[in-house]
Image (cartoon, helix red, strand yellow):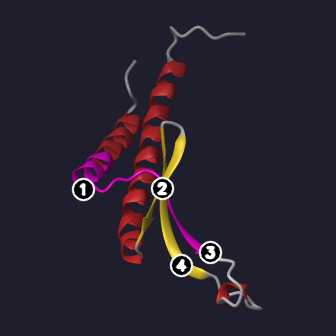
Amino acid sequence: MGLTSAQEDEARRIATELAELAASGKVLPGSIAERRTHCGRAGCRCMANPPQPHGPYFQWTRKVASKTVGRWLSAEQAADYRVFIENDRRMHELLARLEAIGADLLEADPRTRRRV
């Protein structure tokens, strides 16, 4: 089964963008969250009315062997690495589109038996 010209064009665009992401080397899985905390000490500003929590603190988290692991980042690091995480998400979107092209080809293949 061959690709249609539209599918070939889309696959080419996807490959070009994936190559650009790979060449940049700026890909990082996970997410960065901004956290504010309360220490609980009496008289601390975090316990005032209204409370003024400590922070912001930035935490990068990701999954390793089905477990969430994390690392604290400076505000500067968080700003720098957000682009890496956006690139990782974009890469996954592009791969999903490429997989959809393959699934469409398989479904359109007359040799594929359909289950009733």
- Residue 25 is one of the magenta-drawn residues: yes
Seen in the picture, residue 57 relative to 52 is either above or below; the reply is above
Are the residues flagged by discs 3 and 1 in contact, CB closer than 8 Å? Answer: no
Q: Earlier in the sequence, mark 3 or mark 1?
A: 1
Report the amino acid beneath label 4.
Pro
Seen in the picture, residue 85 relative to 91 is either above or below; the reply is below
The image shows residue 22 at horizontal and vertical percentages of 27, 48
Report the amino acid beneath label 3.
Thr
- CA gap between label 3 and label 1 equals 35 Å
Are the residues flagged by discs 1 and 2 in contact, CB closer than 8 Å? Answer: no
Which residue, given by chain and number where applicable, does mark 2 sit on?
70
Q: Earlier in the sequence, mark 4 or mark 1?
A: 1
Which residue, given by chain and number where applicable, does mark 1 sit on?
24
Are the residues flagged by discs 3 and 4 in contact, CB closer than 8 Å? Answer: no
The image shows residue 52 at horizontal and vertical percentages of 66, 87
- Residue 15 is one of the magenta-drawn residues: no
Q: Which residues are magenta?
A: 17-37
Of residues 3 and 49, the one drawn nearer to the viewer in this rendering: 49
Of residues 88 and 106, the one drawn nearer to the viewer in this rendering: 88
Occupied quadrant, residue 15:
top left
- CA gap between label 3 and label 4 equals 8 Å
> Mark 1 Cα within 10 Å, few/some/many (few <14, many 20+)?
few
Mark 3 or mark 1, whichever is nearer to me: 3
Which residue, given by chain and number where applicable, does mark 4 sit on?
56
Report the amino acid beneath label 1.
Ser
| Quadrant placement of the N terminus | top left
Q: Earlier in the sequence, mark 3 or mark 4?
A: 3
> Mark 4 Cα within 10 Å, few/some/many (few <14, many 20+)?
few
Which residue, given by chain and number where applicable, does mark 3 sit on?
37
What is the residue that sits farthest to the front in this orientation?
A: 42
